[in-house]
Image (spheres, rainbow, N blue to C red):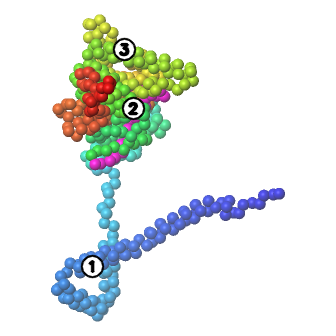
């Protein structure tokens, strides 16, 4: 049986609907243009009526009678005068049109004189990099038109460029890192130092977008973050870099901030972390923040090579296996960590061969936090002991399968003393404090898309997880609660996150509880 054709309204109904909407929109725009004078007069009459009501309400009651008599007299004179009503109507319409006009001051089109001078200076500075003698129609030339090179621009309240789109010729070598670095350095200098700029290169469209980034928040204190087991918050970054936010509490205020989340565990591709920074840049702060988060689900072993007591608040806490500052204790603790890693591997392997789940004691995460391991190298050489870094090879190589995570923090001046296993197996990297572009690339393995600044607050830096992008990072404020320079608010925030102390600070066992009732004699 032949199929009947669809009705025309169903076959081309969408086209008719779209055409009807376009006609309705056109008719509405035309009606608005035609009725614009009437709309203006109506708005003016409404404003005049409102002004009359306010005038009447402000007039004292004892003077309203004479005011009514005066108005009535004026109306009578206008009504009796030749052409009075016509002139009164024309005057009223003119006053209504004047009152109903759009009073918004039109914004000036284009940049002002100082902004134009900035754009011209920036254009002239880019001429040597974006021009070639063989170009028959150069986009960049001395004394050329900067309007064609900068299709979009915005300025902040200080008059400096906050957003700029730069068009460049197709023959510019935008695929080379050195060429990009020269342009970024020039734009950073010409657009105003002291700010961080984000550079987005569109190689396909031959455009560069420069955006001045606002400073990251530094008032986020240590707190319980809403994360799953195996997720650790390293800090916070720009909203455009990640697609996730965390609810945070700042006093009585609640806000959502985008975090940099590091995932550890058996399925992690970056199971270990390396933190490098300058003295006072916040490396110890980051390790304290990670330790407080790790103690929710696992055990922590801390090794401090600086000997400054930055982790004394963790001593004897529930879940803290040890806080070592001396060489002998450090070697003993790391030897135990290596043996524990091997034990976990053997136990998990036997369970898999037997078809059983892994034992419970191998599932609990073990975190090894090592701060400045290079400080132990000369001491170990003088005492004839092993370098503690050599004891990290087993946890670093087999830690992911054994649910062991290693975090190493070192300063820039001692970064060359890090062993090869530490460099090879720490694929999650963090750089804190002021650093040059070459230093960032050497540690992170890639250049950031922003320009580093010379002066940054503590805990400010960059993070890169494996082969991912480079993120700006601000570590949450997690100071040493025993430091006198710590504010009371931050001290209480850190103390509230510390587990209960189950072992005295000197390492002795707690005495047994005294029984409340006497024990009955065995003989009766």
Badge 3 marks a residue whose secondary structure is: helix
- How packed mark 3 is, by other alpha carbons closer than 10 Å (few <14, some 14-19, many 20 or more), is some
Badge 1 marks a residue whose secondary structure is: helix
Decide which of 360, 511 is in the foreground and name it.
Answer: 511
Sequence order check: which comes first, mark 3 or mark 1? 1
Q: Residue furthest front?
A: 524
- How packed mark 1 is, by other alpha carbons closer than 10 Å (few <14, some 14-19, many 20 or more), is few
Q: CA distance from mark 3 to mark 1?
A: 89 Å
Asked if one can make out residue 432 in the rendered structure from this viewpoint, the answer is no
Q: Is disc 3 in contact with disc 1, using a CB cutoff of under 8 Å? A: no
Residue 53 percent location from the top left of the image:
27, 79
Q: Residue at x 45, y 22 (%)?
A: 402
Decide which of 66, 210 is in the foreground and name it.
Answer: 66
The total number of labels drawn is 3
- Residue 447 vs 326, above or below: the answer is below
Sequence order check: which comes first, mark 1 or mark 2? 1
Query: Closer to us: mark 1 or mark 2?
Result: 2
Q: Is disc 2 in contact with disc 3, using a CB cutoff of under 8 Å? A: no
Q: Residue at x 34, y 79 (%)?
A: 93
Using the rendered view, name the quadrant where residue 468 is placed: top left
Decide which of 328, 485 is in the foreground and name it.
Answer: 328
Give the residues drawn in magenta, as a range: 252-274
**In which quadrant of the rendered image does the C terminus lie?**
top left
- Residue 446 vs 496, above or below: the answer is above
Residue 335's tag is 3
Looking at the image, residue 20 sits to the left or right of residue 218; the answer is right
Residue 3 percent location from the top left of the image:
78, 58
Q: Which residue is mark 2?
A: 297
- Residue 78 vs 159, above or below: the answer is below
Q: Which residue is mark 1?
A: 53
Residue 417 percent location from the top left of the image:
32, 15
């Amino acid at each position: 049986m032949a199929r009947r054709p669809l009705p025309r309204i169903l076959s081309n109904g969408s086209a008719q609907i779209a055409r009807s909407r376009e006609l309705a929109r056109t008719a509405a725009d035309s009606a608005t243009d035609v009725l614009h004078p009437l709309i203006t007069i109506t708005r003016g009459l409404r404003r005049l009526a409102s002004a009359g009501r306010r005038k009447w309400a402000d007039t004292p009651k004892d003077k309203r009678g004479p005011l009514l008599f005066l108005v009535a007299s004026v109306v009578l004179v206008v009504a009796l005068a030749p052409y009075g009503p016509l002139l009164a109507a024309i005057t009223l319409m003119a006053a209504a049109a004047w009152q109903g006009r759009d009073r918004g001051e039109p914004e000036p089109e284009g940049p002002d004189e100082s902004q134009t001078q900035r754009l011209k200076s920036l254009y002239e500075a880019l001429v040597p990099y974006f021009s070639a003698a063989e170009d028959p129609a150069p986009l960049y030339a001395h004394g050329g038109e900067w309007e064609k090179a900068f299709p979009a621009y915005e300025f902040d309240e200080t008059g400096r460029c906050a957003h700029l789109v730069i068009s460049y010729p197709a023959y510019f070598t935008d695929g080379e890192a050195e060429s990009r670095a020269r342009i970024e350095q020039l734009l950073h200098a010409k657009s105003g130092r002291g700010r961080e700029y984000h550079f987005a290169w569109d190689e396909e469209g031959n455009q560069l977008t420069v955006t001045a980034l606002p400073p990251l928040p530094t008032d986020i204190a240590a707190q319980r973050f809403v994360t799953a087991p195996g997720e650790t918050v390293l800090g916070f970054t720009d909203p455009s870099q990640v697609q996730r936010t965390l609810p945070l509490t700042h006093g009585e205020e609640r806000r959502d901030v985008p975090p940099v989340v590091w995932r550890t565990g058996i399925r992690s591709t970056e199971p270990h972390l390396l933190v490098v920074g300058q003295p006072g840049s916040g490396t110890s702060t980051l390790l304290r923040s990670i330790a407080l988060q790790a103690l929710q689900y696992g055990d922590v072993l801390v090794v401090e090579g600086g000997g400054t007591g930055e982790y004394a608040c963790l001593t004897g806490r529930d879940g803290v296996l040890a806080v070592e500052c001396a060489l002998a204790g450090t070697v003993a603790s790391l030897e135990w960590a290596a043996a524990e890693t091997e034990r976990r591997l053997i136990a998990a392997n036997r369970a898999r061969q037997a078809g059983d789940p892994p034992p419970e004691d191998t599932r609990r995460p073990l975190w090894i936090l090592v701060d400045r391991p290079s400080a132990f190298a000369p001491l170990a050489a003088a005492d004839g002991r092993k370098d503690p870094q050599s004891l990290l090879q087993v946890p670093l190589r087999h830690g992911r399968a054994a649910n062991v995570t290693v975090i190493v923090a070192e300063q820039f001046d001692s970064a060359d003393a890090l062993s090869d296993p530490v460099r090879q197996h720490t694929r999650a990297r963090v750089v804190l404090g002021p650093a040059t572009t070459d230093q960032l690339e050497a540690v992170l393995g890639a250049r950031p898309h922003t320009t580093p600044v010379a002066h940054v607050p503590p805990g400010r830096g960059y993070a890169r997880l494996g082969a991912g992008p480079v993120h700006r990072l601000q570590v949450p404020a997690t100071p040493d609660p025993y430091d006198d320079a710590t504010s009371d608010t931050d001290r209480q925030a850190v103390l509230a996150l510390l587990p209960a102390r189950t072992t005295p600070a000197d390492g002795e066992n707690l005495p047994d509880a005294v029984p409340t009732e006497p024990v009955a004699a065995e003989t009766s």
